[in-house]
Image (cartoon, grey):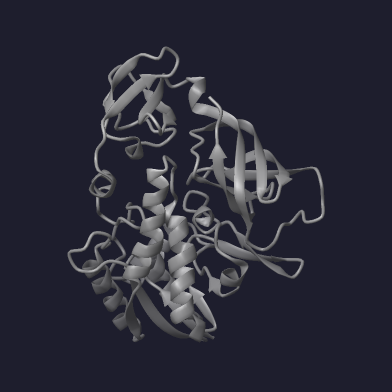
Amino acid sequence: MNIAVLISGGVDSAVVVHKLVEEGKHDLHLFYIQIGMDDDEGDCSAEEDIEMCTLIAKKYGLPLDVVSLHQEYWDNVMDYALRTVKAGLTPNPDMMCNLMIKFGYFEQRWGKDFDMTATGHYATTDCVGGIKYLATAVDPVKDQTDFLAQITHEQLEHVMFPIGNLPKSEVRRIAQEVKMPNAYRKDSQGICFLGQINYNDFIRRHLGVKRGPIIEIETGRKLGEHNGYWFHTIGQRKGLGLSGGPWYVVKKNIADNAIYVSNGYGTAKQYGRVLHLDEMHFISGNPWQGQEGTFEITFKNRHTPIFMPARFTHLRGSEWVIESERDVQGIAPGQFAVIYDRNHHLCYGSGVITGQKI
């Protein structure tokens, strides 16, 4: 099989290369997607990454191309993130990066020339009733299906996840055993589109500073000031600069540039059980097409190993509602809720959280 392998310089995609080489039946071509230029913000430590990718390519005698999608990244992922934050919502740039860049522009320009594209994502696929579905990884802590839940079925048909059936500990062990040059390299902790750039510095550079009040929602008492609602998200605890905490952001008033907070680990204001979704996207088609009623699911509203049991009901068009069986912390409008089957094996897709009630 002729396979394009997306590598990042990290250990996960390096082990993908090793596994595919070990199978001994593929023609591999390695690609590194560069999304930032030298000395340009958005550059995710590209120089060091490319050096690692070059060493891996040489180790296995494989071709490596460094391809630039810098402008496409700015025009799509960056623009989406800034527009969402400015609207007072919480973006998911990693999800948009996968949809638009890795499985979007890359596939259209380079991936289309190969039988499949392989990545180092922690995910799997499964075939049910002749239909290919996105499925969760063996390692629940590393599972990345929540970052893939906006991709299309056409994109899914052309992708493979060779390490999705391995725990992270095994991936590290393999890398060390075969003496990968990056075997001991730390995992990236940066947001996809920022790399090593500080998030608040990035937001300040593009949206500026606008002082506004921090208000205790129960009493209406002003506790302090913030630099702009766009620096804060629902459920946030750190970075508020308030004493006597913990304090949680539970509401934002965009018109007045006001942040509302509630105090205490057990404050009910940081929890909810009902999530309204719009723009619901099913990767492999609606599994309940033609059925009416309420469906048993699990879901995530943030990157976590925990799958929450819930009931899922169609309202109209692309609108759905999740009724969680447990309290959900930090329901943030603009974020995506990712929908799974009751056994949290198949990932059906995702929708945008539209609001909350306080």
Looking at the rendering, in which quadrant would you find the N terminus?
bottom right
- Residue 296 in the image: x percent, y percent? 73, 43
Indicate left or right for 200 with 215 as reference: left
- Position of residue 71 relative to residue 91, above or below, is below
At a point 67% along the width and 38% down the height, the residue shown is: 310
Question: Residue 56 appears in which quarter of the rendering?
Answer: bottom left
- Position of residue 26 relative to residue 143, above or below, is below
- Position of residue 258 relative to residue 19, above or below, is above
- Residue 290 in the image: x percent, y percent? 82, 55
- Residue sitting nearer the eye, 136 or 77: 77
- Residue occupying the far left of the picture: 39
Question: Residue 47 appears in which quarter of the rendering?
Answer: bottom left
Indicate left or right for 175 with 52 as reference: right
- Residue 204 in the image: x percent, y percent? 25, 44
Q: How many marks?
A: 0
At a point 37% along the width and 23% down the height, the residue shown is: 247
Indicate left or right for 71 with 19 as reference: left
At a point 34% along the width and 63% down the height, the residue shown is: 74
- Residue sitting nearer the eye, 165 or 347: 347
Indicate left or right for 303 with 274 as reference: left
- Residue 93 in the image: x percent, y percent? 42, 54
Residue 273 visible in this rendered orientation of the protein: yes
At a point 49% along the width and 70% down the height, the residue shown is: 103
Residue 110 visible in this rendered orientation of the protein: no
